[in-house]
């Protein structure tokens, strides 16, 4: 069930330089969501920016849920100025979250940058469904923006850090770290992060016979399957499924269905 | 005061209020069903239908701009067959008034779409989209590429579609013309029952960091509050020379915006991409129009059409 | 890295950077002198000058719209005599590069303005405004009323003005056309040294409480960030078919906006009503363009013109 | 000297229902202003609203100045949300304030609604220049929005209240109250408020041989004499002075120079 709610802001604190967590009071959304779904937020009540902003639902439970966001442009800058007690209009939960097939032996989560947001919720669900904490690869440009590390360690997930600049963990990219973990055909990889990272993760998975679910990003207008604006190209044959909506058929896809080497994805 | 009458008649189509949604911004109606009862709308206008399903343009397809957005969807749609089989039943069951927007590659395709929709009960009125800026390849077009930019072609297309159907027929025009009255009059001469104004304005946005266009199709159509003044002006221009009604749209977000269009001469209005921002925008517009009528002592909303005060 | 070169040449006019201001949004230059040294601009473009002073339209003349504004000033200006006597000395003393925008009622009036400005040293280049939407009475016009809407008339006007002056001559065109390439090519054929794109889009705003137009002239010209995508698209269209340069404008507020115009094919840009919001907007645009060049390793800003990446 | 300053917000408190006073840190503006001048404020750093908002400079002195405003639309609503410590970009002081010719025997200030804003500063200047507190007529729709009353009583000005609904003082309009005060040819009336009120005040003055300075309002884009957007029609003969800019030649005019019965002033 999708809701359109005015949510009271419980907190909006900085969690790392340029990154914040917005905690919202919104029972209906908190109850109906599952890991990997997202919501569309109004970043200001005015006309600028005109469109809502898509954000993964990070934590949820009880009466509230949160989004973890990085300040990149006008919309997120305005989100950053919201005060506890203010109201934010939210539409959600939207899209299809991660699915948890039980036939795999290993589950590896690969999060890059702010793409980490939906993964703690996924780890929790995996523990619930499979009984075992998944392995987690956390990638970031540098150590101070490695997010959510404690969430995973608290759940007893083995955590492997990797940074572009080597300031924490392995020096390199998420895909290098994944390769080092030697995924095999009994491994299901979940990934969320920059398109270029997810493309590399996908290739490592294919090379090793692993499966991969990727949570994609796309520019969105409606977030709700209406405008046809957020499509990505698939590898599927049927003409009808050549373009699928990230907001509606996704944001989580089997990575084999996505045409990774296409021209200009919105944000790569 | 008594409840104002919001009923209008749009070129032969009775609507319980003057508010529909703009084609392409409300899917096939059912998508917004979880936000409100879509049968409360004066009519539901569906995404442009073509004879065959269309995959649309490559992504990225949308880009935000100041108080608006560009889109280059390229008419991705399920095609008329799937529409009739899978989308129509919801609208009929809800008892919605349906305006089917159609798109074809030739007058004959439009005529075929019109004929089938009428025969199979797929619509209560038809809106022929002669003005989609996104189905041509920006790199290769040359000269005015839209049918709606040529009054002569507007007339021919309208005549052909007109001959194929007795449903109320609206012709949707483009703002990318020097004088909107010319294609509007051509539609009227061709036998249209109303004109729909405006489709999106051609526009372009560039990501200066990558130096690439923000849309894979390079250019797209601009919609949203940014274009409202342009749309109101075109409605005002057209309404004063036409004998048929105008369905006004372009940037409507609030009831006040919608009332501007009525005052400028529109008989009905369509809420477009505002629904993306506020899924219940069209419903709020209807409510606000009713409140406006009560506040201003207007018993029949039709009195607002063209009621701009010039003194 | 070394300081990037910002110099450009706009149809014979050497400018120290590609940024001027749009006519009518910067007065005669001196008005903004208390905010910054206006000689830092690539050029100062002055308010349209006519042979006689003009009182302009009745108020209200401006109305705010989403991310933009409508104006119907009606070319209120001091006239060429007062300009030469009272306004020019400031600009000359400051050593500004001057683009004089001119407006006349006939080709001959334009020619006379051009001749006098050249003879009396009133300008380093001329911009002929063939596209002002506000000097006609909205109630009575009929058919495309602007010279810039008729390629034939654009050519005639350009030829007449061309014959009267050897100053660099720019022709300022209107976006209210189906295909901007037609008047742009007509200006080129007529002998223009550059085209200036775009003037305001025709628009209208209505106060629904009073039911009156917000402007006494009823319609006005829309400017501001709202129209930027339309302007960039027109620059892109025109630049690809022209051999003469394009002066791009319409909604520029930041350096990134300005760079969009360059990438789309403009050689120089004008900051318009953004100066109302930020009196030093044009200066900030220049600074931001310089920073962009440094950040992107661009040694000569001319390399950005038309450098849109389509792959 | 006109300044363009980022001013720190010292306070932004409600002073009456829907009315607030914004106090700004801005020495340069505070020092260079005189009663009746105004400033152009950015109501938000974003693009919506696009234009600045003109506001009379109410109090000024030392390092700070204030504006007293009524929340009527989007811009003033956004102003209302500004917090102490925030920054507001201000351009000013602009325009020509009130002038104080000494040849009159009586000075009467007539303020309507939020038009009261520049009048306390004027009263202070009049006391300084003439030695006598001016008479003050304060008009408002009803008692709870009669503003600045204490400012005037503190300066020992005789204050006459008038309300549309009779909830305080005289029941009626500002012009009725002025008529009752019997202005004569030795009286200079200063007025600021709705156009319709000022037009009536002007007529009473003309009937009684008084002079009147009126502070006008008009839609403004630049606020600084550039756009020619804020003109009003005058009674002056010279073609050249038929339209004068409220922001530049005004906002204060000799009421005889203004064509009061013209068609559609922006806000009447
Ligand atoms: C399903 C989904 C989930 C997301 N979850 C998160 C999250 O949990 N935390 C987080 O920080 N970010 C998330 N993003 C990205 C986030 O939506 C963008 O960072 C944000 O919209 C940027 O807005 P802006 O105004 O600050 O930036 P601007 O660059 O000014 O935005 C301009 C336009 O581009 C769009 N845009 C810009 N960047 C992106 C992007 N990366 N993806 C999609 N659209 C973009 C904006 O929505 C807007 O329409 C998610 C995106 C999607 C599609
Ligand atoms: C010289 C001058 C001094 C002023 N001093 C004060 C003051 O001290 N306190 C105060 O509360 N108000 C003052 N006003 C009026 C104030 O500028 C408007 O109330 C304000 O701009 C409304 O903005 P908004 O966005 O809230 O309203 P909206 O109605 O949303 O504004 C829409 C547009 O109309 C313009 N506008 C709306 N109302 C007015 C108006 N009355 N006058 C001019 N433009 C208007 C706005 O600037 C904007 O461009 C003054 C106006 C002028 C010209
Ligand atoms: C994403 C999107 C898709 C659209 N698709 C169609 C379409 O299929 N057929 C059509 O006639 N118009 C289409 N339009 C144009 C709208 O119906 C409408 O004319 C235009 O958006 C202006 O109204 P607005 O500013 O209120 O959105 C589309 C607009 C948008 C934003
Ligand atoms: C208040 C105002 C007055 C203008 N006056 C003129 C003018 O006198 N001559 C002219 O050629 N263009 C005039 N223009 C148009 C601008 O020069 C420019 O083409 C247009 O505003 C688009 O640019 P912008 O969106 O950056 O403002 C005027 C625009 C505004 C807003
Ligand atoms: S964002 Fe509109 S369909 Fe996905
Ligand atoms: S507001 Fe621009 S001239 Fe007065």
Image (cartoon, coloured by chain):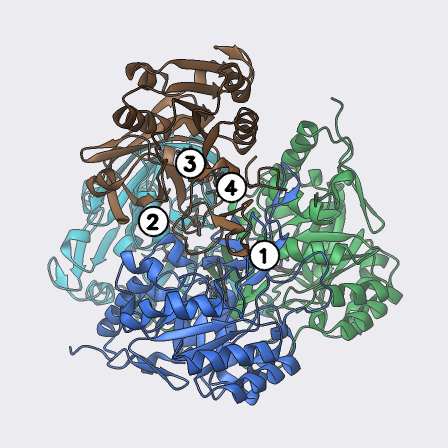
Chain colours: A cyan, B green, C blue, D brown
Q: CA distance from mark 2 to mark 1?
A: 35 Å
**According to the image, label 4 marks what residue?**
D257
Q: Chain of mark 1?
A: C
Residue in front for this viewpoint, D26 or C135: C135
Residue D65 disc label? none
Same chain under badges 1 and 4? The reply is no
**Mark 3 vs 4, N-terminal side:** 3
Q: Position of residue B66 (x, y in %)?
A: 45, 56
Same chain under badges 1 and 3? The reply is no
Q: Is mark 2 within 8 Å of ligand 1?
A: yes
Same chain under badges 3 and 2? The reply is no
Residue D76 disc label? 3
**According to the image, label 1 marks what residue?**
C220
Could you tell me which residue is drawn at 54 percent across and 83 percent down? C161
Instruction: Say if mark 2 contacts mark 4, CB within 8 Å.
Output: no
**According to the image, label 2 marks what residue?**
A76
Does residue C12 appear in this view? Answer: yes
- Local secondary structure at mark 4: helix
Q: CA distance from mark 1 to mark 3?
A: 25 Å
- Local secondary structure at mark 2: helix
Packing grade of label 4 (10 A; few <14, some 14-19, many >=20) is: some
Packing grade of label 3 (10 A; few <14, some 14-19, many >=20) is: some
1 or 4: mark nearer the eye: 4
């Amino acid at each position: 069930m999708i809701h359109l709610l005015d949510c009271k802001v419980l907190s909006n604190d900085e969690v790392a330089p340029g990154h914040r967590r917005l905690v919202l009071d919104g029972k209906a959304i908190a109850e109906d969501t599952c890991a990997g779904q997202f919501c569309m937020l109004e970043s200001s009540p005015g006309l600028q920016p005109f469109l809502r902003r898509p954000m993964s639902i990070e934590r949820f439970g009880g009466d509230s849920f949160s989004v973890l966001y990085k300040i990149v442009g006008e919309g997120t800058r305005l989100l950053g100025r919201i005060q506890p007690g203010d109201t934010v209009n939210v539409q959600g939960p939207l899209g299809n979250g991660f699915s948890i097939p039980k036939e795999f032996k290993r589950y590896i989560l690969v999060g890059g940058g702010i793409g980490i947001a939906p993964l703690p919720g996924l780890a929790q669900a995996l523990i619930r469904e499979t009984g075992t904490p998944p392995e987690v690869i956390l990638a970031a440009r540098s150590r101070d923006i490695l997010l959510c590390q404690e969430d995973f360690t608290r759940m007893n997930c083995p955590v492997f850090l990797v940074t572009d600049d080597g300031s924490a963990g392995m020096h390199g990219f998420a895909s290098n770290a994944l390769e080092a973990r030697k995924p095999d055909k009994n491994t299901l990889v979940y990934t969320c992060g920059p398109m270029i990272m997810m493309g590399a993760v996908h290739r490592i998975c294919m090379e090793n016979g692993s499966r991969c679910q990727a949570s994609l990003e796309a520019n969105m207008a409606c977030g709700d399957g209406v405008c046809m604006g957020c499509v990505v190209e698939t590898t599927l044959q049927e003409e009808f499924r050549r373009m699928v909506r990230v907001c509606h058929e996704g944001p989580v896809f089997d990575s084999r269905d996505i045409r990774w080497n296409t021209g200009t994805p919105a944000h790569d | 005061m008594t409840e104002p009458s919001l009923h209008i008649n749009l070129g032969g189509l009775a609507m319980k209020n003057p508010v529909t949604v703009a084609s392409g911004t409300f899917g096939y109606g059912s998508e917004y069903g979880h936000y409100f009862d879509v049968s409360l709308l004066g009519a539901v206008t569906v995404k442009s239908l073509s004879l065959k399903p269309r995959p649309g343009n490559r992504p990225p397809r949308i880009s935000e701009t100041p108080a608006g957005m560009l889109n280059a969807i390229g008419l991705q749609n399920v095609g008329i067959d799937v529409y009739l089989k899978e989308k129509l039943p919801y609208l009929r069951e809800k008892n919605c008034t349906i305006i089917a927007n159609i798109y074809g590659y030739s007058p004959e395709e439009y005529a075929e779409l019109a004929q089938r929709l009428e025969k199979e009960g797929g619509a209560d009125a038809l809106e022929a989209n002669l003005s989609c800026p996104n189905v041509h390849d920006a790199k290769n077009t040359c000269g005015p590429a839209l049918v709606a930019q040529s009054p002569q072609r507007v007339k021919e297309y309208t005549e052909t579609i007109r001959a194929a159907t007795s449903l109320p027929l609206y012709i949707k025009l483009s703002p990318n013309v020097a004088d909107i009255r010319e294609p509007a009059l051509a539609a009227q001469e061709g036998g249209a029952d109303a004109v729909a104004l405006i489709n999106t304005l051609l526009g372009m946005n560039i990501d200066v960091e990558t130096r690439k266009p923000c849309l894979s199709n390079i250019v797209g159509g601009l919609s949203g509050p940014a274009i409202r003044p342009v749309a109101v002006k075109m409605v005002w221009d057209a309404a004063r020379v036409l004998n048929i009604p105008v369905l006004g749209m372009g940037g409507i977000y609030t009831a006040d915006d919608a009332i501007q269009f009525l005052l400028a001469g529109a008989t009905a209005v369509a809420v477009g991409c505002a629904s993306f921002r506020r899924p219940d925008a069209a419903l709020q517009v209807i409510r606000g129009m009713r409140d406006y009528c009560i506040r201003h002592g207007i018993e029949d909303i039709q009195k607002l059409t063209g009621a701009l005060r010039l003194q």
